[in-house]
Image (cartoon, rainbow, N blue to C red):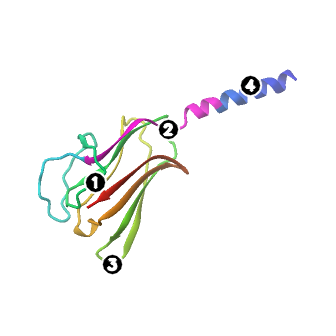
Amino acid sequence: MRLISALHLMAAVCLSSSALAEVRLEGEVEYGIFESPQVELEPGERMLRTGQQPIQRTSVIPARLGTKFGMRYVLAGKREGDAPLTLLYLTPGVVGPDGARHDKFEVVQAMAPAASHDVMAYEFTEPHELAAGEWRFWCFKATRKLAEQTFEVQ
């Protein structure tokens, strides 16, 4: 009996410590437009910037080249070697130069335990990307949704 009880106790300790190590959203999600100097960009041009710039909190996004929008959040419990995040961008239908319609973009992103913040963002760099309508950003760890934000591109 004592052996069974000890095994149950050890299993409970292992389960509770693995639950503590589970990746989870911590605090508030910042979302909106990543601020940058006002520069008119040509198609294909990008402005180099970090994910640390201020975010103008809004869910209404101008359909303009150079606009970078998304969310910044803190994930607690990240460990080296964890399964990656899946970043899912649902679009109102971006039509590529080849005429193909893209209702979603999926990015698999390695876990970055040393990063203080995680960023999920999209930057308009080509005229064909300027699709007006609802854009939904979802961040998943396996099948568990960690963060979600909806934007209206106009």
Q: Which residues are magenta?
A: 16-33
Name the residue: 55% across, 51% down: 143
* Amino acid under disc 3: Gly
Question: Residue at the left extreme?
Answer: 39
Name the residue: 26% across, 70% down: 128
Image mark for residue 60:
1
17 up-or-down from 38: above or below: above
- Where does label 3 land, which residue? 99
State the separation of the CA atoms marked 3 and 1: 26 Å
State the separation of the CA atoms marked 2 and 3: 39 Å
Kindly indicate the quadrant of the structure image that contains residue 97.
bottom left
Q: Secondary structure at mark 1?
A: strand
Image mark for residue 9:
4
Mark 4 or mark 1: which comes first in sequence? 4
Name the residue: 33% across, 64% down: 133
* Amino acid under disc 2: Arg
86 up-or-down from 30: above or below: below
Q: Secondary structure at mark 4?
A: helix
Q: Secondary structure at mark 3?
A: loop
* Amino acid under disc 4: Leu
